[in-house]
Image (tube, rainbow, N blue to C red):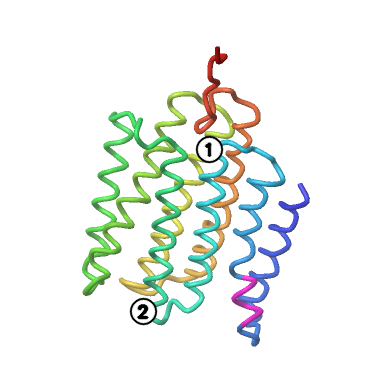
Amino acid sequence: MKTFGLFVFSMTAYLTSVYTRTPNETVAVVLKSLPVATLAVFVQVEKRCHTAYARLLAAGLMFSAVGDFCLFWQHLPQWFIFGLLAFAVAQLLYALAFDVTHVTFDGTTVVTMATAVLTYAYILPGLKGAMTSLVGLYVILIFSMTAAATSCLRRDVTWPRLSACVGAVLFVVSDFVLAVNKFRFPLPHARFLNLSTYFAAQCLIAFSVLESEQDPKALGTPKRRGKEN
């Protein structure tokens, strides 16, 4: 658990730098990217879960860390787009880890997709130019990831799958706060709400890797091949 301890330490250091306004830009951007990068190491090295599921989660976490790096300069349009694209890749990787190709089309999935449409419709008035399509693509990906996580949980209720599902929902909340604050109107305590739900989401998604240690039915676990003649 040493790597997870590093996550807690780096997250605390970053949040401290946010609210004390660290003057050194290099230190600030490293602190912003480090917490989620340490979760990627936690998933792939500390837990030694060398499955497709773990590799997809680790890759998603690394792309998220790249997104964190880019969004440090989110007030610059090109850097916000780079960050958005990095997080879009992360959502795609998470969706693949949660086996998005086997999402069951039921009431929960319908509600999730309807929420996606309403979310985009609400943000749309504040979007211009390329952001209109890029944000639309991102909304599709993050809600597909959430639908996959909830579908996965309904197929087999385990603590790691519940962790992934709650993490997915918190990710949506975090990004919704960011989007409303950026594209619609300023929200009170927006940064605190965004960061607290974001770090909780990534942590819970990372913890779902425990399933690939404990549950032989874990998503992404390679099937055993029969003995070769």
Look at the image and give the residue range highlighted in magenta.
Answer: 26-31
Location of mark 2 (residue): 77
> Where is 101 relative to 36, above or below?
above
Q: Amino acid at mark 1?
A: Ala
Residue 73 image offset from top left, x and y in percent:
47, 79
> Where is 134 relative to 71, above or below?
above
Image side of residue 89 versus residue 48, left or right? left
Residue 163 image offset from top left, x and y in percent:
55, 39
Q: Amino acid at mark 2?
A: Pro
Q: Nearer the viewer, residue 222 or 127?
A: 222
Is residue 225 a member of the stretch shown in magenta?
no
Q: Quadrant of residue 134?
A: bottom left
What is the spatial separation of the Cα atoms under label 1 and label 2, in whole angstroms?
A: 35 Å
Callout 2: SS: helix
Quarter of the picture containing the C terminus is: top right
Location of mark 1 (residue): 52
Q: Nearer the viewer, residue 42 or 173?
A: 42
Please name which of the two marks, 1 or 2, marks the residue nearer to the observer: 1
Q: Residue at x 52, y 67 (%)?
A: 68
Residue 225 image offset from top left, x and y in percent:
53, 19
